[in-house]
Image (cartoon, rainbow, N blue to C red):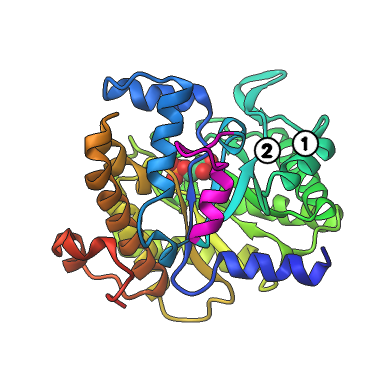
């Protein structure tokens, strides 16, 4: 795998009109999501759910890659094919979450540091052997009166940079995900300040660890007020603040920015992405999505753990994928949300 191949893979993941499906919830997180709907979480039910998502007809027109969890990358479909092969046959690239979760930061118990560097080189080699071509590591930054501390930013940025360097050595494209959480009562202005500080340190550390920016993707949160903030900014303000912040900190060599949804509703995450892409002025990177909940929630609800509902659930995923495809191209319109879903199973024709 040459540096050229890695750069090509990074660009392919953000090819026009394509984004990433994050389906890498840990067993505990997916169990919580299943629980809310009364679906039993077992190794089999998690596999059936993921197989339903991955076999959605036509979804490859909108989805370039899927981020898997360790359990999923080892699972086989109902007819015995590895789930990675199911994806590849659709023309979708398998990726893998490689951090081992965010743990309390010593000396600062209300802040988190993401772990997983120990043994990472060997795990990356194993995942690559199983078909993964890109990876994800999520750092979590919370906002509050005294948070984030500069220590929290620096340990998380350092870990992200070391992870990214190891990925490139192993022939995997790293997705670098510093998430500034929406939880809290902070203003959009404070979110912008914190996101700026975080991106500044992340790119400094990426440079220090000699990460090739052409061979990675950035997965940031949008600049948005805290869920309990005094004022929720309109879509246009979120778009302007987010783009301003990214322009100030993300070098043009990075081929793509793929947002997380972070707890926004599915529709709002699409509207924000579309508004960002429609903003005037230079955008040196592709701007797309790597959503988890904002792509999956409607599909999970429609599926409800039942094989009879597979068609309806796939239609729900397809609809969100097509709306976000249009948003990544800046061609999304509100009408698409209400458009007949009958056409949602085929290839895109709305852009
Ligand atoms: P959400 O879009 O649900 O925030 O998930 C994206 C993700 O991969 C978080 O790490």
Residue 262 visible at all: no
Report the residue at 23% width, 70% height from top: 333
| Front position among marks 2 and 1 | 1
Local SS, label 1: helix
Within the magenta stretch, is there residue 181?
Answer: no
Which is nearer the eye, 267 or 188?
267
Q: Position of residue 318 (x, y in %)?
A: 31, 56
The quarter holding residue 157 reads top right
User: Can you identify the residue that label 2 sits on?
Assistant: 98
Image position of 265 (left or right of 171): left
Looking at the rendered structure, which numbered label has been put on residue 203? none
- Where's residue 222, x and y in %? 46, 53
- Disc 2: CA contacts within 10 A as few (<14), some (14-19) or many (>=20): many
Q: Which of 156 and 299 is in front in this view?
A: 299
Read off the magenta span. Answer: 75-90
Tell me which corner region of the image, top left, top right, bottom left or bottom right, holds residue 235.
Answer: bottom left
Q: Does the magenta stretch include residue 84?
A: yes
Nearer to the camera, 348 or 162: 348
Provide the secondary structure element on which disc 2 rests: loop
Q: Mark 1 points at which residue?
A: 123
Q: In which quadrant is the N terminus drawn?
A: bottom right
- Asked whether disc 2 touches disc 1, contact meaning CB atoms under 8 Å apart, the reply is yes
| Ligand 1 contact, mark 1 (Cβ < 8 Å) | no
- In percent of the image, x 79 and y 34: which residue is there? 117
Q: Is residue 259 above or below residue 334?
A: above
Q: Which residue is drawn at 54% across and 42% down?
A: 81
- Sequence-first tag of 2 and 1: 2
The C terminus, quarter of image: bottom left
Badge 1 local density, few (<14 within 10 Å), some, or many (20+)? some
């Amino acid at each position: 795998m040459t540096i050229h191949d890695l750069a090509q893979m990074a660009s392919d993941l953000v090819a026009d009109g394509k984004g990433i499906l994050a389906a890498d919830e840990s067993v505990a997180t997916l169990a919580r999501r299943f629980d809310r709907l009364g679906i039993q979480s077992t190794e089999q039910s998690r596999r059936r759910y993921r197989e339903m998502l991955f076999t959605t007809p036509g979804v490859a027109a909108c989805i370039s890659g899927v981020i898997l969890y360790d359990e999923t990358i080892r699972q086989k479909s109902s007819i015995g094919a590895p789930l990675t092969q199911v994806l590849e046959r659709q023309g979708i690239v398998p990726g893998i979450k490689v951090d081992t979760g965010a743990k309390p930061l010593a000396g600062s118990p209300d802040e988190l540091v993401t772990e997983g560097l120990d043994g990472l080189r060997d795990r990356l080699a194993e995942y690559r052997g199983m078909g993964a071509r890109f990876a994800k590591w999520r750092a979590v930054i919370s906002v509050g009166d005294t948070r984030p501390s500069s220590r929290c930013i620096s340990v998380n940025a350092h870990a992200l940079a070391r992870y990214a360097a190891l990925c490139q050595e192993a022939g995997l494209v790293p997705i670098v995900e510093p998430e500034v959480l929406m939880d809290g009562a902070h203003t959009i202005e404070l979110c912008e300040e914190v996101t700026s500080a975080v991106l500044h340190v992340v790119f400094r550390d990426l440079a220090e660890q000699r990460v090739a920016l052409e061979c990675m993707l950035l997965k940031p949160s949008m600049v948005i007020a805290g869920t309990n903030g005094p004022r929720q900014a309109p879509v246009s303000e979120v778009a302007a603040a987010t783009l301003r912040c990214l322009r100030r900190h993300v070098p043009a060599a990075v081929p793509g920015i793929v947002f997380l949804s972070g707890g926004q509703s599915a529709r709002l995450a699409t509207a924000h992405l579309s508004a960002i892409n429609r903003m005037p002025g230079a955008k040196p990177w592709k701007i797309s999505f790597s959503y988890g909940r904002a792509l999956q929630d409607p599909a999970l609800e429609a599926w409800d753990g039942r094989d009879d509902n597979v068609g309806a659930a796939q239609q729900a995923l397809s609809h969100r994928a097509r709306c976000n495809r249009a948003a990544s191209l800046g061609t999304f319109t509100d009408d698409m949300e209400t458009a007949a879903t009958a056409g949602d199973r085929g290839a895109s024709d709305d852009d």
